[in-house]
Image (cartoon, helix red, strand yellow):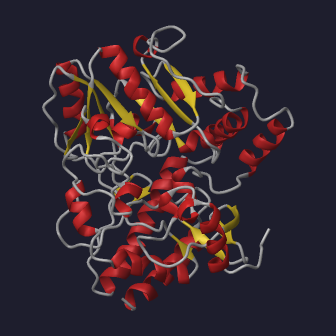
């Protein structure tokens, strides 16, 4: 329902009752300036703001809506389930079905625990790794965002970087106020795309197999293989944070895409069809340290929420029955989007990189080599060009994330028409830089 209120009016109201006017900092427009638009509804590749203006949407709930917004199969699954109640605090058949669907798609992932967010998934996976190995330290990579739990906020990219909260990208210093030095004392931060030395004190190494929270940075050849070997040699567990890449890069996620099998996986976004959900899983002997079998405690009243489970099952089923290989179609759309933006920028004499990893697209306004780590990403994001690009495209009716540390998510609902319009808009925007 449109409200016919200007964004400035809605923003003023929001700021009175919500800290900073938003319920997740990445939604604020601090990195690009101006006032956010407020979404009233969405369908397919589009969102409509509160006064009825339509945008072609490449945010797609930061990757959750792989089929596009309000897909009939997802809407139907939620509608049929909601009449049975919204939460029970008891086991459901749907939880079993979703866990089975995840394990069937991801070889080596033998058991799954459902939670309510990606942050819960990564936080819990770390606890499992520490409990299983009886070790305390963890290794993470600068620029990889694994949610907002205390020990993972050091050098975490995404919204923390967008808001300028990080003062040091190479040390395990707290990424924000409220996180004490003691809480990150066991967190070791190392550069992405470099295999670290792993001591006998390290419980696990957690990584985004394709880093999608510092722009888009692909793993260089041998990086993931090197991590797998280093963890094997040291006895540490390898955790893939696949909240973004899971069931988006391929049917089996990044581990299938790259041919590397971690010890633990973290999932979210796609497996909830746009509803709040997360999951972590791994091989049976590791997962069985969890209560009630083992002594590692983790719980959640809304874990395995029946509506989120139904939506997620509908998405995974649709990806299996949607005709031509959906991942090939997604990848083709992503490549065309990257080619469109690259050609428009080049014709205008603007230096730009548009990295691709399967159906993920990034953008860096720089002419300095391929971006392979967080320091390079920060340098590329410091020139203010992204804000010009963002507002130019938004004024042409095309929505990208309001921050240069995020990626673009073309969905299965984006057609040649949307891509062709994007090409026309990009040519006009870059010519006016």
Q: Residue at x 47, y 9 (%)?
A: 294
| Residue 377 position within the rendered picture, expressed as x and y whole percent measured from the top left | 26, 61
**In the drawing, does residue 68 fall left or right of residue 103?**
right
Q: Residue at x 50, y 48 (%)?
A: 327
Q: Is residue 414 visible?
A: yes
**In the drawing, does residue 85 fall left or right of residue 354?**
right
| Residue 145 position within the rendered picture, expressed as x and y whole percent measured from the top left | 37, 47
In the depicted view, which residue is nearer to us: 110 or 305? 305
In the depicted view, which residue is nearer to us: 214 or 123? 123
Is 66 above or below relative to 423? above
Is 396 above or below relative to 125? below
| Residue 205 position within the rendered picture, expressed as x and y whole percent measured from the top left | 27, 31
Locate the C terminus and report the quarter of the image it occupies.
Answer: bottom left
| Among the 4 quarters of the image, the one containing residue 229 | top left
| Among the 4 quarters of the image, the one containing residue 292 | top right
Q: Residue at x 48, y 15 (%)?
A: 290
Locate the N terminus and report the quarter of the image it occupies.
Answer: bottom right
Q: Is residue 251 visible?
A: no
| Residue 367 position within the rendered picture, expressed as x and y whole percent measured from the top left | 20, 73
**In the drawing, does residue 155 fall left or right of residue 58?**
left
| Among the 4 quarters of the image, the one containing residue 217 | bottom left
**In the drawing, does residue 356 fall left or right of residue 315?**
left
């Amino acid at each position: 329902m449109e409200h016919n209120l200007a964004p400035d009016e809605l923003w003023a109201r929001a700021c009175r009752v919500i800290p900073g006017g938003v319920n997740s900092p990445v939604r604020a427009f601090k990195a690009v300036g101006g006032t956010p638009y407020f979404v009233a509804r969405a369908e397919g590749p589009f969102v409509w703001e509160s006064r009825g203006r339509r945008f072609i949407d490449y945010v797609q709930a930061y990757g959750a809506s792989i089929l596009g917004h309000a897909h009939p199969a997802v809407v139907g699954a939620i509608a049929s389930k909601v009449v049975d109640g919204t939460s029970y605090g008891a086991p459901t058949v749907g939880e079993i079905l979703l866990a089975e669907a995840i394990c069937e798609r991801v070889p080596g992932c033998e058991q799954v625990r459902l939670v309510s967010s990606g942050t819960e998934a990564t936080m819990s996976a770390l606890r499992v790794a520490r409990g299983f190995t009886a070790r305390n330290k963890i290794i993470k990579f600068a620029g990889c965002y694994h949610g907002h739990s205390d020990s993972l906020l050091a050098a975490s990219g995404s919204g923390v970087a967008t808001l300028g909260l990080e003062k040091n990208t190479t040390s395990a210093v707290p990424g924000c106020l409220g996180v004490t030095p003691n809480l990150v004392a066991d967190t070791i931060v190392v550069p992405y795309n470099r295999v670290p030395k792993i001591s006998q004190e390290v419980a696990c190494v957690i990584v985004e197999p394709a880093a999608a929270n510092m722009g888009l940075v692909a793993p260089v050849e041998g990086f993931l293989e090197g991590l797998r070997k280093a963890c094997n040699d040291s006895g540490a567990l390898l955790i893939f944070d696949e909240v973004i890449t899971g069931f988006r890069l391929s049917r089996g996620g990044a581990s299938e895409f790259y041919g590397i099998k971690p010890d633990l996986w973290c999932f979210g976004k796609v497996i909830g069809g746009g509803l709040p959900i997360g999951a972590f899983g791994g091989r049976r002997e590791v997962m069985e340290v969890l209560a009630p079998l083992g002594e590692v405690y983790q719980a959640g009243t809304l874990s395995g929420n029946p509506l989120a489970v139904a939506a997620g099952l509908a998405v995974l089923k649709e990806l299996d029955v949607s005709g031509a290989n959906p991942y090939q179609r997604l990848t083709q759309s992503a490549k065309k989007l990257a080619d469109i933006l690259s050609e428009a920028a080049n014709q205008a004499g603007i230096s730009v990189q548009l990295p691709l990893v399967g159906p993920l697209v990034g953008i860096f306004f720089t002419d300095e080599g391929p971006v392979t780590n967080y320091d390079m990403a920060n340098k590329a994001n410091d020139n203010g060009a992204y804000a010009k690009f963002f507002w130019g495209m938004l004024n042409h009716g095309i929505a990208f994330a309001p921050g240069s540390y995020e990626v673009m998510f073309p969905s299965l609902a984006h057609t040649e028409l949307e891509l062709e319009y994007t090409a026309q808009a990009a040519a006009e925007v870059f010519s006016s830089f």
